[in-house]
Image: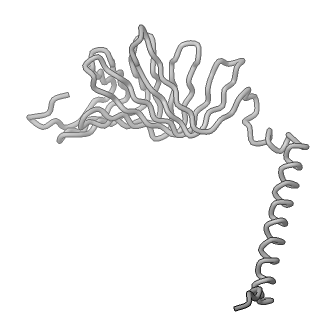
Amino acid sequence: MAWTPYKIPKKIKLILLSIILITVGIIIVVYLGFRRISDTPELILSTIQDGANLSIGRIQQTATRDGKREWSLEATSAHYIETEKQVILKDLAVTFFLDDNSEVYLTAQKGVLNTDSNDIEVSGNVVIKKDNYRLTTEQLNYDHKQRIIITKVPVTISGNSTNILADSAIFDLNTKKVRLEGNVEGTLSADSAL
């Protein structure tokens, strides 16, 4: 039996040639696009916030004192401004670690981390969660040295058949106590324990 070479049909040849040409075309377009961006760095820099020395997406930072974690922060974007020693954050979540190994969770739309003090200012749909309790407000500050959370705008605390409103609040992370001030009103059930 004699060996006969297999002939590739014309349709398959055309399909393979088309795939090769399309692939080469895509590679050329990507290459030219990359060259255009690398030749004009202002296209890249236009996405960085004015005055920022460094802008990055997705950030995570942990603050420690004497080898012990005090808080951990995550954000979807960060803009570091060296002259102000601040990091401007977007969509952030902070976990505070307490001495009894429990945790307090904070979320907000915007924040500012002062890099020289580790103090944090947050605003926009601010929520703090601890166990079954939830504190909501629009703006607050975290004082890292004293480990206290302070808000001077109205707050609501809810959970376990509890609903309390106040004009301002101070949450001491060392003692796990909350002090409410100004027009404090609300309801507590008989078995509520803050």
Going 80% across and 71% down the picture, which residue do you hit? 20
Percent position of residue 33, x then y: 84, 54
Q: How is the image coloured?
A: one colour
Name the quadrant of the C terminus: top left
- State the residue lying farthest toward the top: 66
Q: Nearer the viewer, residue 144 or 32?
A: 32
Going 79% across and 67% down the picture, which residue do you hit? 23
Residue 8 visible within the image: no
| Left or right: residue 103 compared with residue 66 | left
Q: Nearer the viewer, residue 72 or 104?
A: 72
| Left or right: residue 63 compared with residue 158 | right
| Left or right: residue 154 compared with residue 183 | right
Q: Give the image quarter of residue 83.
A: top right
Percent position of residue 58, x then y: 57, 38
- State the residue lying farthest toward the right: 39
Going 29% across and 21% down the picture, which residue do you hit? 179
Residue 57 visible within the image: yes
Name the quadrant of the N terminus: bottom right
Q: Nearer the viewer, residue 174 or 60?
A: 60
Going 83% across and 50% down the picture, which residue do you hit? 34
Q: Nearer the viewer, residue 50 or 27?
A: 27
- State the residue lying farthest toward the left: 190
- State the residue lying farthest toward the front: 1
Percent position of residue 101, x then y: 27, 22
Q: Is residue 174 above or below residue 131?
A: above
Percent position of residue 106, x then y: 41, 33
Q: Give the image quarter of residue 133.
A: top left
Q: Give the image quarter of residue 111.
A: top right
